[in-house]
Amino acid sequence: MAKKTTKLSHFSQWKALGIIPVIVAVLAVVILVKSKSGPQQKEAGETSRVLRVMKVPVVDLIPRTIGYGIAEPGKVWRAVAEVRGRVVEVHPRLKAGALLKKDDLLLKTDPTEYRLAVAVFQAGIAQTKADLSELAVQAENTTASLKIEKRSLVLAEQSLTRKKNALEKNTISANEVDLEERNVLIQRQRVQDLENTMHLIPSRKRALEAKLASNEAGLEQARLDLAKTVFTAPFDCRIGSVSIEPGQYLAAGQVLFEAHATAVTEVEAQVLGDHLRHLIGVKNDTELQTSMFREVGRRLGNIKAIVRIRSGNWNIEWQARVDRLRESVDPDTRAFTVVVAVDRPYDKVIPGRRPPLSRGLFCEVELKGPPHPGSIVIPRAALHNDKVFILDKESRLQPVTVTTAFVQADLAVIDSGLTGGETLIVSDPTPAINGMLVTPVWDREAHDRLLAEAGAETVLQ
């Protein structure tokens, strides 16, 4: 019994020893919880947005626009056979793409028929001139004979008068008077014949002169036809399509080949009316077509033009000049057609690297007008309908309502609302809260791009 009591006592001791650590741990947790202070409360501050900004520049803006068109030669000669004949000679380089010089003999047809025609008319002219000379001599002879016959008539009439007086005195017979009167009548007939001949000479002369004129006209036509058997290049050219062969018989009106002038290449660029107006400084499209048309033509001469080809690795430029404004407006786009001309487009050709500005190339045309001094410009992306956002002196966002004069590529020209020098927000500030605090980051790259687009190198203060 004593042993059993001792065992229970030992168990109670071990149980008491196991509870003590638990109690200690619980007390420690309670002490830590009670001694720990709560989270520190910080006072709420104002949030600042980080946005890109730039100073609004005032520049001498160079208005410019881009148009596109197809290169075409300034002159195209379509050789057409004006007379019939067989081809007897062809230039060895009369082939598509060949470059030929002015006055080069390109083609010749058989001239025999037209040489014979020239000879026939020359003979006719010589014959007619001989007939005119003969008529002139005949007129002189007839005039002299008429004078003689008239004198003979006077003498015969005097003799008749004397014989009539003698008959009255019965000194001669009536038969002698009759014979003398017959002589007078014969002489009068001779005078009348010569006068008739003289009256016909002017009409005969006119007929011969008309015949001479006809022969001379025929000779001129024959010579023209003879000249048309030879085709020479009217200017330095590049040959287009060719549709003839040596020995071929040509009919009048048959198209033979094309030749494209190499002195000038033209490009017709489509330009919107708004852009063209700002280039030349007129108010509306009506002035482009009506009242100021002559003035518009003069101002077109102040526009500088550059023609470019961008294709693969090619980025080639030619200086050009504005030649004219086409007479019609595109009915769908309301775009005007500006014709620019490139002089000597085959100069500076480098095979494989720089081609000539030849027919059919798709071109970009940049047009630059005279500078607009004192223009206020901003990036187009900074314009939100009719508003922009700027920073005030406390770096807080402020909306400003502006009026846009016009938009050019990636910039907008401001007519009112900004004066230049403002700190403009060029990032998207959405949501844009009036008066919100902004941390500005100066965007030098956007500033430089804007100046480059405006064509300006320095900001005008």
Image (cartoon, rainbow, N blue to C red):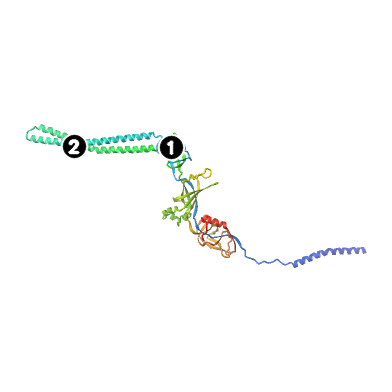
Question: Where is mark 1, residue-wise?
Answer: 107
Q: Is residue 9 visible?
A: yes
Residue for point 55% across, 56% down = 448
What quarter of the picture does the N terminus occupy? bottom right
Q: Residues within 10 Å of mark 2 (few under 14, many from 20)?
A: few
Q: Position of residue 430 (x, y in %)?
A: 58, 60
User: Where 201 falls versus 421 (above or below)?
Assistant: above
SS under mark 1: strand
Query: Which amino acid type corresponds to the residue marked 2 in the rendered image?
Result: Lys
User: Seen in the image, is 271 located left or right of residue 42?
Assistant: left
Residue occupying the far right of the picture: 1
SS under mark 2: helix
User: Seen in the image, is 427 located left or right of residue 88?
Assistant: right
Q: Is residue 1 visible?
A: no
Query: Which amino acid type corresponds to the residue marked 1 in the rendered image?
Result: Leu
Question: Where is mark 2, residue-wise?
Answer: 147
